[in-house]
Image (tube, rainbow, N blue to C red):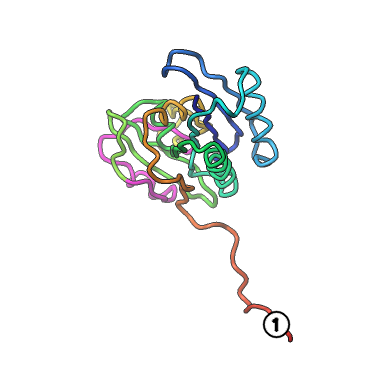
Amino acid sequence: MILAIDTSAAQCAVALLGGPINAIEPVVERRAMERGHAEHLFPIIDTVLARAGTGYDSIGRVAVCTGPGSFTGVRIGVAAARGIALGRGIPVIGISRFEALAAEVGGPVAICLAGRGGAVYVQAFGADGAPLAAPRMTGEAGLAAAIPPGCTRFAGDAAHLLAGDKARLPDGLPDPALIARLAADREGAALPAPLYLRGADAEMPREGPPVLLD
């Protein structure tokens, strides 16, 4: 069974997918929240496992949304997924928020996600679902120039900047069941890491380190 986790944005979402892909309905729990993912994630996982009538021993693979999104939220999800996988000795697969939303809409599509301070994160995908370029950060003024020529479909919580009311998936929140399906056939050669397209807001102190007295 595949356990999928998303805490990258304004939700704490978990899905459990078992058996042949698409053969049975996944068990899904999605709760809207801006913060508090650390306190709610494992209780939600327990709820999903209980609804499925199973436990951690049945999990054979973990999938996690690697962002971009909330700096803290992404770290929480990735750390939890890696911890569960390490404890069980099973693969852990990272799926970006771009990939999950593009798979839900279907290509060709440009995924546009809102960041802090007017930043917009963007990545375009072709008709086959493959990325056309690496994800990048831009601003509202430079968004149109970041879209490959001929891409006229837009999804995500910043897609309205280009598509108006024709934007798809305006909340920009991935479906955890789809994250599980995307991870089903992928190889987990490397541990997933958070996808950060900008630095953390926190700054290191500017003064020097304290003097140690003997």
Image quarter where the C terminus lies is: bottom right
For label 1, the crowd category at 10 Å Cα-Cα, with few meaning under 14, some 14 to 19 and many 20 or more, is: few
Residue in view at x 46 percent, y 26 percent: 178
Residue 36, position as x, y percentages in the image: 68, 41
Query: Among all residues in the image, which is located at the extreme left?
Result: 149
Q: Amino acid at mark 1?
A: Leu
**Is 155 one of the magenta-colored residues?**
yes
Residue in view at x 42 percent, y 50 percent: 137
Residue 20, position as x, y percentages in the image: 42, 17
- Placement of 36 over or under 210, stated as above or below: above
Query: Among all residues in the image, which is located at the extreme right?
Result: 214
Residue 153, position as x, y percentages in the image: 35, 30
Left/right of residue 76 with respect to residue 107 in the rendered view: right
Of 125 and 209, nearer the camera is: 209
Of 213 and 210, nearer the camera is: 213
Residue in view at x 66 percent, y 42 percent: 38
Looking at the rendered structure, the number of numbered marks drawn on it comes to: 1
Left/right of residue 107 with respect to residue 181 in the rendered view: left
Of 214 and 180, nearer the camera is: 214
Span highlighted in magenta in the image: 134-158
Residue in view at x 48 percent, y 50 percent: 119
- What secondary structure is marked by label 1? loop
Q: In the rendered image, which quarter is residue 207 located in?
A: bottom right
**Is 210 one of the magenta-colored residues?**
no
Q: Which residue is mark 1?
A: 212
